[in-house]
Image (cartoon, coloured by chain):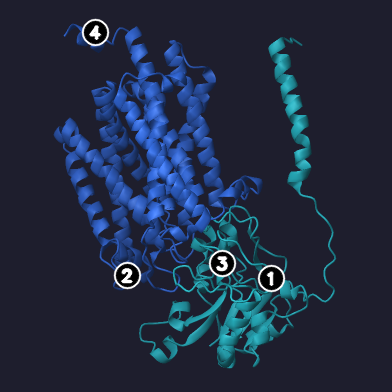
Chain colours: A cyan, B blue
Amino acid sequence: MDMNRRKFLKIGGAVALGLSIAPAGKVLAGVKGNYAPNPEALKAKNWAMVIDMKKLEPDVEACIAACHKEHNVPDIGNKKEEVKWIWTDDFNHLFPDEAHERLGEKYGKKQFLALCNHCENPACVRVCPTKATFKSKDGIVMMDFHRCVGCRYCMAACPYGARSFNFKDPRPYIKEINPKYPTRTMGVPEKCNFCAERLAKGLLPACVEASKNGGIIFGDLDDPNSEVNKVLNSEFTIQRRVSLGTKPKVFYIV
Amino acid sequence: MLEKALIKESNRKFWVWILSLLVVIGIAFLAYIGQLREGLTVTGMSRDISWGLYIGQLTFFVGVAASAVMLVLPYYLHNVKEFGRITVVGEFLAIAAVIMCMLFVVVDMGMPMRVLNVFLHPTPNSPLFWDATVLTGYLLLNLFIGWNVLEAESKGVHPPKWVKVLIYISIPWAVSIHTVTAFLYSGLPSRHYWLTALIAPKFLASAFATGPALLILICYLLKKIANFDAGKKAIDKLALIVTYALIITLFMIGVEFFTAFYSQVPGHMAALKYLFVGYHGHAQFVPLMWIFVVLSVVAVALLIPRKTRENEKTLIIACAAVFFAMFIEKGLTFTIGGLSENPFGGITEYIPGVSEIIICFGIWAIGLLVLSLLYKIVVSVKRETDFANGLYNSQETLKHS
């Protein structure tokens, strides 16, 4: 082989570079430990929710309060930057495809509970450039607040307005900090997580627990015998903006 | 060759210009420190309008960057010799524009210190990941190409062969950067204003009007202040490109109106109504949109007749009109207008924050700074080669006069 000084230095340099960055592979691949799941954890393949507004009506405020308290959701106090995981809005606003111009105020302005739909085909997960928003094995659309770069693409993609952004440090706006759930930093979006942290401990979501009359039914969509499927088979239910193909997993009994 | 950016210029105005840009950048940097500390609350963005001035201008300047291909393609593929003198002017404009794009992305991020997560956790299903990738690639391509071609010229030799390969790659690559930027928008369910396959072609067409229009303005400026003449033929050719691209752009904007208002589908009409006549009592962008319409009409009227298109004065007016019209349509109202109708059927308005505007000016200043230094190199090299070729004699005539 014809080897001159220049070529030798080139090859030598490439080898040295290769050797020096080889260990980085291990770091980049991530060290995976083993964790035993809590034996009491609630398990499902595809968590879903049915909201029965008639039964839920008296508990709506309690549901919202329970969720926001549980998850340290700040009360920013202005509409521009408000943070909300679960809230109520008019039927007209939440179900634009079902509402029509002649729908009277009685139903048009009826309040419905809104939250992340944990879509089976989530647009927010599709657009996230870092997989900071992802779908868990049990069908929950989750967020990694520590990976998120705060580009807000997920907010533009979500057709349900489910996401809020921390435009400023949220901590001063939390009335009472719940030490069991992390607070967020400014610069990342957040939304309902179907109480993944409670399910892992064997507890039902905070809103489900707060709906004392059974206004919210929570269960496994992939289990034909689940409570959710029983209700879906026996009651007339609707969903928000079905035509978009996101396959939401929050159903409503009108 | 880099030293040419720094060597003493007898022209004092140049350094005053550079210094004033640095002052603007300094002020904007302070504003950005403020944004880092306070959060994006200093901007006009909100829960509903989650993208504002920053992403709007990112979109616009991707177009400016992509438009370099309007010089490179005719010159290298169709042997349009008139562009030989200014392809590097286009490539360096692309470099400055891509740098501005990257800065607009970073200042828009809530967590800019994590920006590398985009590459540490590559996510091919996200158009934003691709946007970051193709923009980085495009920046490198233009740096290598522009630099090597110019360096070869300054040494009076032909550029190395591998540069030609990069040049051919850069042509579809330029198209890709604006296509991917269009895909940021056109694949989102429920954003009616964006959910159309026309976005990518419209973006490309408007880019090919805006970029060459800006290049014409730059050429006149370089002629006036740096005695660098691009040549009348090159300008005429560019003006023709601007004319066709502008008409195609306006055609594509126009056909959206037909689809929306003939079909009468409310979602399709909402954003157009909001932007051009007002909707639900909100009419924030109506004056801007009509300025866009007037500027477009003026530009078309001046560009179509050959007489005004090839007249320096009217061409300058037309190019400025094209640039500002497209800046309004793409840089200001496209992004914000698409988000204005929130998911609950209401309209949210957008008033940019003071810091937000200052930061935008800072990024413009950085773009101008990069452009000024790069063009200083170009002008110095061209001056030397012109001198060597015996074409450069204006100084001589000056001496004798």
Q: Amino acid at mark 3?
A: Pro
Query: With B374 as the anchor, is A68 left or right in this view?
Result: right
Residue A200 in view of the camera: yes
Q: Amino acid at mark 1?
A: Tyr
Q: Tag 3, which chain?
A: A
Mark 1 on the same chain as mark 2: no
Label 4 element class: helix
- The answer to which quarter of the image holds residue A108 is bottom left
Residue position marked by numbered label 1 in the rendering: A181
Q: Tag 2, which chain?
A: B
**Mark 3 neighbour class, 10 Å CA radius: few under 14, some 14 to 19, many 20 or more:** many
Residue B396: assigned label: 4
Looking at the picture, tell me which residue is in the foreground, A187 or B53.
A187
Task: Please report whichever mark, 4 or 2, sits nearer to the chain's N-terminal start.
Answer: 2
Residue position marked by numbered label 3 in the rendering: A170
For the image, the number of numbered tags is 4
Q: Residue at x 52, y 17 (%)?
A: B160
Query: With B314 as the anchor, is B115 left or right in this view?
Result: right
Q: Indicate the position of residue B344 as horizontal and vertical percent values.
A: 44, 74
Q: Indicate the position of residue A59 as horizontal and vertical percent values.
A: 59, 90
Quick one: quadrant of the C terminus of chain B? top left
Residue B264: assigned label: 2
Label 2 element class: loop
